[in-house]
Amino acid sequence: MDDKQLLEQVLPLIGGHKNVSRTDIRPDALYITVKDTGMVDRDALETLEGVEAAELSRSRVTLWIQVQDKKDYKEKTKMDYEKMGQEILTAVGGKENVSALVHCATRLRFNLVDDDKADQKAVEAVKGVMGVRLQGGQFQVIIGQDVSHPYNVIMKICGLNDTSASAPSAGEEKKKKGNPINSVMDILAGIFTPLLPAIIGGGMITVVYTLLTMLNIISADSNTAIFLEFLGNAPIYFMPIMAAYTAAQKFNCNPFLAMGLAGAMLHPTFSGIVTAGESFSILGIAVMLATYSANALPVILAVWVMSYFDKFFNKYVPKMIRIFIAPLLTLLCGAIVGFIVVGPLGTVIAQQLTKVFQLMIDHVGWLVVTMWGAFSPLLVMTGMHYTLGGLFGTMYYMVGYEGAMMPGMLVSNVAQGAAALAVFFASKDPDTKALGASAGLTGLMGITEPALYGVNLRYKKPLIAAMIGGGAGGLFAGITSVKAYVMASPGLISLPIFIGGGSMNGFICACIAAVIAIVVSFVISFILMKAELSKIEK
């Protein structure tokens, strides 16, 4: 029996269509919100074929559907994701209108051939879609943490792969010519966004390493500790190679040549020369002795320059010898310019950015972190957090800690989670409570988009509460000079990233700042939403 047939049998037993305000069909359950619970025949519902159990709680009817075996359940879930992906693709104009697609932690990021062909309302109507944003030249569909499933479906239908997924679209080219600032923002976001899983994964492994050694569960000299330490550091150390790949996709050149160039800049031989302080030259031209590990900016600039060599040689080298000569000349010329000009330039830029950010933190650190804490939700909505994150992250790569973005994001993330959780306690509607609980707990752990788009932005007042709470927590974190010594998604589960500097003070202050943000945002959101929801739910 399919879901439609089951629903047809259920309706007469719960008072018909007129008594139903909302239905939610899942692979293993059917949730129905009713207006009058007195019209529900719970005993009769449990006798229906395919129903394992029936529950009635306040205004919500839950029917647990019998799943024959795990394989059936997985297949049904897979079908739901396939349907979701197909509906989203149709709503954005079909596969012919998709020139590129990537995803971050919660969003599908489309580059469309023609933005006018996308039906925003139709996309928002797809089950499982939380919202749509148009920013940075991308059509962004907010899904939540299950984003990888519809992404895989759409990639398969469109015939895209990881190499073509980030190729510039015609729309992007027009945007680049029209607005250089948007172009730079889009490039930085496009380069750093795909790196987040590796960076966050490495950061969380470092958190585990820190906790295990700090609590003396394992010795810092043990093989297990050494393994966890270099495993956690690896994504940051080799980030330039990963950034070279995504930069090549943005600049439309061969990504493997780009990775080869980045590998040369991180090569142990050159690193040894830098460490020893020996003089080094190429073609008689002195090379600046710079360390390129964990610093993506010089490599990104080098790949940008190499992309022009790649296009030039592939266009003008005769076809007969192109397969050998074009890669040789592209890599050689790109490396020479990279080592002599672009790499040192990127290093100088990174150093100057670090000095600027350090001055800001030293003189008005309380204001910077307060603003991060208060306005992070707006940065997330506009996509600016990826661009600014790449810039502020430069400070971490250069000096080993970061004292503005990470503390600000910590208090903002937990404030958003607390504001959404307050809706759970303020509401009497089962659906609203379920959404507030799941989005709130996820936000407290550091993933805020379900809370932001599913609850806070929807009701607006929780968003205001989260911004006030984030600002209050940020003020305390800024005054006490909280710093992060590991790059990870800030939340309650990753608080140990603030352990460092030879003291536990930063960690303790980070915990206090998080508590301030949680309490302030929760109380304000609860007070504001209790009155509003009581009127709505009557």
Image (cartoon, rainbow, N blue to C red):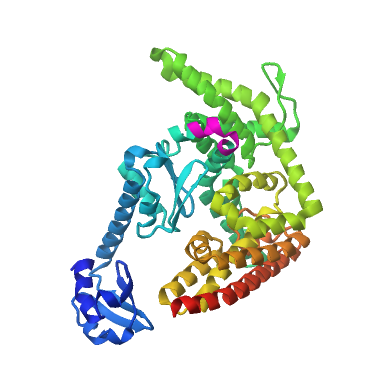
Q: What residue sits 51% from the left and 34% below the top?
A: 175
Q: Quick check: 452 left or right of 294?
A: left
Main structural element of the magenta stretch: helix, strand or loop?
helix
- Please say whether residue 306 is visible from this viewpoint: yes
Asked if the magenta segment contains residue 47, the reply would be no
The residue positioned farthest toward the right in the image shown = 363
- Please say whether residue 213 is visible from this viewpoint: no
Instruction: Tell me where residue 500 sits by quadrant.
Output: bottom right
**Residue 216: % across, % down:** 65, 67
Image quadrant in which the N terminus is located: bottom left
User: Is the residue 338 above or below the residue 525 in the image?
Assistant: above
**Residue 374: % across, % down:** 65, 60
User: Is the residue 350 above or below the residue 465 in the image?
Assistant: above
Residue stretch rendered in magenta on the structure: 174-183
**Residue 61: % across, % down:** 32, 79
Q: Quick check: 108 left or right of 419?
A: left
